[in-house]
Every structure is written in structure tokens, then in C-alpha cells.
Amino acid sequence: MAILIRTMPLLLALTIAGCSLEKLTTYQLVAPEKSPVLTAKGYAPIKSQPGPSSDQKFVQAMEASRMDAYRRLAEQLYGQQLRSYTRLEGETVGRKSMEVKVQGVVRGAKVTHQRVEGEFYTTEVSLDTATLATLGSVESKPLESEHKWWF
């Protein structure tokens, strides 16, 4: 009986601690008040593209310039990952190298201009960052909260 009386506060504390609070929060995506429009321009030389005919080289240049424009847009959205290596031979620099990587998903961008400029095919793309709210890529604020008590 003495053991039960000594352990009663511990059992009471464990019973109370067993009750937990669960909070369910629902979020709604909200566009920022002022959103910038990002633009990027891509270039591709027409003559140096692979292909037997000038028409095929032209089409390859169109695609290459579009991909370059999207890469430049991704740089603005996500930044660049840089790796730099320097090798020392004795007390002098023997070899330097640098890698640059861009990785990301670009959604909602539009091609605004495509044209030939000199010997290059250029493509310009733009992205209104306000559209990112409809794509699910912006911060959100709580819409409602619900508390539940579990015993």
C-alpha cells in the first residue's frame, strides 16, 4: 500500500501527459503584392549547328536558343552551384578548373520573342512571378486552425 501511495503522483503525471493536443492548420496560397517579371535571352549560332541542310541547322538553332533562354531564367530563379578546383605543383598553381551547375524546374514562363540577329538565333522568355502562386510555389498563410483534444 505504501508503494502505491508513493507511485500515485507518478501515475497521475503519466496519465495527464498521455493527453495530447493535435492542431490541424489549412493554408491558402497568396500571391505577393508586388511581383517582378523575370526575362532571359538565349543565343545559338546558326551555322555551327549539326545537320546536312541549312533548314535543319536553323531548326536546331531555334531549339538551342530556347534551351539557353530557359537555362538563364533558371539561374535567376535558383542561382548557380559552383565548384572550383586548384591544383598546386610544388609552390606554383598547376591546374585550375571550375564547374557551374544550374538545376531547377521552370514553369509558367512564356516565349516572348524569337528572331535572327546576325549569325545567331535568339529567343527571349519571360516569367511573371505572380503566376507562381497559381503553380503552388509561394509562401502561404494560415487559413484556419482546428484544435483537438485526445485522451
Image (cartoon, helix red, strand yellow):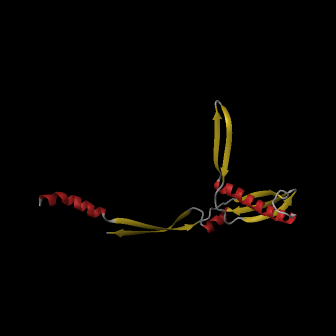
Q: Nearer the viewer, residue 69 or 39?
A: 69
Residue at 55%, 64% in the rendered image: 140
Query: Which residue is rendered at x = 67% and y = 34% of the image?
Result: 93
Kindly give the residue lying farthest to the front in the view shown: 52
Q: How many marks?
A: 0
Q: Specify the quadrant of the image occupied by residue 52.
A: bottom right
Q: Position of residue 116 (x, y in %)?
A: 85, 60
Residue at point 68%, 40% (across, down): 96
Task: Identify the image quadrant of the N terminus.
Answer: bottom left
Across and down, in percent, residue 65 comes to: 78, 60
Give the image location of residue 108, x and y in percent.
Answer: 68, 66
Name the image quarter holding the C terminus.
bottom left
Q: Position of residue 112 (x, y in %)?
A: 78, 64
Say which quarter of the image contains residue 31: bottom right
Between residue 140 and residue 45, name the one nearer to us.
45
Q: As rendered, which of 61 and 90 lies closer to the eye?
A: 90
Query: Is residue 94 shown left or right of residue 112?
Result: left
When asked about the image quadrant of residue 59, the answer is bottom right
Q: Is residue 59 left or right of residue 20?
A: right
State left or right for residue 84 relative to residue 58: left
Residue drawn 64% across the image and 30% down it: 91
Residue situated in front as seen by the camera: 145 or 124: 124
Which residue is outermost to the left? 1
